[in-house]
Amino acid sequence: MLLVDDEDREYTADIDDRLRAALEAVSTRRSEQTVNKTPSSSLRPRDIQTRIRAGESAEEVAAVAGTTVEKILAFAGPVLAEREHMAQRAQQASVRRRPGEASSTARTLGEAVGAHFQTMYADPGSVNWDSYRRPDGRWKLTGEYETPERSGIAELIYDIPGNFVELENDDARWLTGEKLEAPVPEPEPVTDDMLAARRRRAQSSTASAPAAPAAPATPPPASPPAAAAKPAPVDVDTPLEAFLGDETPTEKQAPVPAEPEPSAEPVAEPAPVEPTAAAETPAEDEPAEDATQKPAKKSASRRKRASVPSWDEIMFGGGKPE
């Protein structure tokens, strides 16, 4: 019979009746314990420990094995203790820096971290240290920290034979007290020369062009042209003296006619006035009267000669009644 212990050492033993009885008794007692402890997946205890030693957590291994964290911790406990021990040991190692990196007076990693945290009045014990073994056999050290100035996870490489640590990232350098350089801004992507020239020309023309006044959203309505003032109608019945006596200034007042306009009512054209015999026949054409004619007759003929047609007779026709 071949036996293997936890350290992979092999043993052989002869099988007899006494050994069979002992094995049956032991297997009966352990069967109940094994049912609760053994994961339901194909992961063996050795596989679980290998994963934990490589940096996986118990929760991650439990998710892969399809079992609970408590069952994984039954096999992962010793390996987790080993990782914690290596993290504490690495803090006692010296810090190896790259050429050109500033060095401090601290001799070990723990001293460097403590001196830097004192300048910030922070507790160096707040750093959460952990370690795990890489596939090449070297141990990697991590330190998770959070301070008012900066927070992150420092990564270091712990060399067991040389008893020193190497700084792997900026968080590790800052954690040990180094001053980090300001990050260099990334250069803008290079564009085509012709496209860049067009953009510069467009920007310069836009900057030099005067700003056009903003047009109103809705143009104001155009005012209609002022209608020409029409002269007020003149009442033909209004006497001329009313126009002559009105001195009130008016806007664009029509000129006052010198003579009254004819009536608006349709009036027949005045008939031509035929001069009377008395008007047309001169006094000389009348037959001579006797010198013996009475003075009364002379006055009557003289009154007929003074009869001249009036304005109304000329305009409306007709003569004066005798």
Image: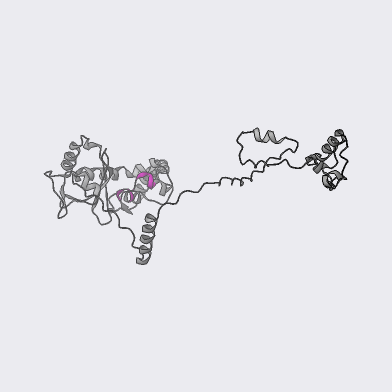
Quadrant containing the N terminus is bottom left
Where residue 244 appears, as percent x and y from the top left, is: 65, 35
Left/right placement of residue 36 relative to residue 307 reads: left
| Residue at horizontal 30 percent and vertical 49 percent from the top | 53
- The reply to whether residue 95 is visible in this rendering is yes
Q: How is the image coloured?
A: one colour
Whether 60 is among the magenta residues is yes
| Residue at horizontal 28 percent and vertical 56 percent from the top | 135
Where residue 164 appears, as percent x and y from the top left, is: 16, 50
Q: How many marks?
A: 0
Left/right placement of residue 252 relative to residue 19 reads: right
Quadrant containing the C terminus is top right
Whether 52 is among the magenta residues is yes
Q: Quadrant of residue 227?
A: top right
Between residue 222 and residue 23, name the one nearer to us: 222
Q: Residue furthest front?
A: 292
Between residue 204 and residue 9, name the one nearer to us: 204
Q: Residue furthest left?
A: 105
Where residue 270 appears, as percent x and y from the top left, is: 83, 46
Between residue 56 and residue 218, name the one nearer to us: 218
Between residue 35 and residue 251, name the one nearer to us: 251
Q: Quadrant of residue 307?
A: top right
Main structural element of the magenta stretch: helix, strand or loop? helix
Q: Quadrant of residue 69?
A: top left
Where residue 166 appears, as percent x and y from the top left, is: 19, 51
**Above or below, comparing residue 292 to residue 97 in the picture:** above
The part of the chain drawn in magenta is 51-61
- The reply to whether residue 155 is visible in this rendering is no
Left/right placement of residue 59 relative to residue 11 reads: right
